[in-house]
Amino acid sequence: NKVVGKSSKDKVKVFATFSNADSFRKTIADGMKSYAESNDINLDFKVADADIETQVRQVKEAREKGYDAIVCLLVDSETSQQIINAAGDIPVIFTSVEPDASKLKEDKYIYVASDENEVVDYKLEYLTDYFKDKKSFDAVILEGDRNQKCVVTRTDSLKEKLRKSGFDVNYVF
């Protein structure tokens, strides 16, 4: 957990910018806070309220304040280059919203998230148990932003895995 160039008495400073403040992101923030407290890391958060310009400004301010790393839950997956530019030489850890992979650089600009197919496996396990005596049912899928790669991957993967598991699903919406 030591940053190169930091003395043992200097705390690592991490800035996190979140696209918005929903319950999912609060769960991530709570986990980050807990980890930071137990590892003597100075962690600060800001919420961009789904505004790209606000998020870019937050990252620029973090750079100016001398943070050691930035954690970013992007407002828009297409804005990763703007965030990288705003961060300057500070490493950026993107999470939850996948940036353009061509913008990533080992040990500098990285993406950390759950395996989308593993998430779908958990959903499939639940649905298989829930519908154990039923192979045909109507379903409504409540999706997030279809511009987010994870939404598309999860939705399409779940539909395919349900089909391969022998379910006949009528998607009514």
Image (cartoon, rainbow, N blue to C red):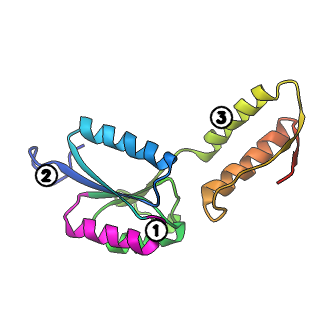
Residue at label 1?
103
Question: Which one is earlier in the sequence, the residue at label 3 or at label 1?
Answer: 1
Instruction: Give me the residue at 41% from left, 75% from top.
Output: 53
Q: Which residues are magenta?
A: 49-68
| Residues at circles 2 and 1 in contact by the CB criterion of under 8 Å | no
Residue 173 belongs to the span the image colors magenta: no
Q: Amino acid at mark 2?
A: Lys
Residue at label 3?
122
Instruction: Give me the residue at 32% from left, 42% from top.
Output: 33
Q: Secondary structure at mark 1?
A: helix
Alpha-carbon span between mark 2 and mark 1: 27 Å
Majority secondary structure of magenta residues: helix
Residue at label 2?
6
Position of 33 relative to 77 (above/below): above
* Residue 88 visible in rendering: no
Q: Amino acid at mark 3?
A: Tyr
Q: Amino acid at mark 1?
A: Lys
User: Is 1 displayed left or right of 122 in the figure?
Assistant: left
Question: Which one is earlier in the sequence, the residue at label 2 or at label 1?
Answer: 2
| Residues at circles 2 and 3 in contact by the CB criterion of under 8 Å | no
Q: Secondary structure at mark 3?
A: helix
Of discs 3 and 1, which sits in the foreground? 3
**Mark 3 residue crowding within 10 angstroms, few (<14) / some (14–19) / many (20+):** few
- The number of discs equals 3
* Residue 103 visible in rendering: yes
Alpha-carbon span between mark 3 and mark 1: 30 Å
| Residue 147: quadrant of the picture | bottom right
Q: Secondary structure at mark 2?
A: loop
| Residue 62: quadrant of the picture | bottom left
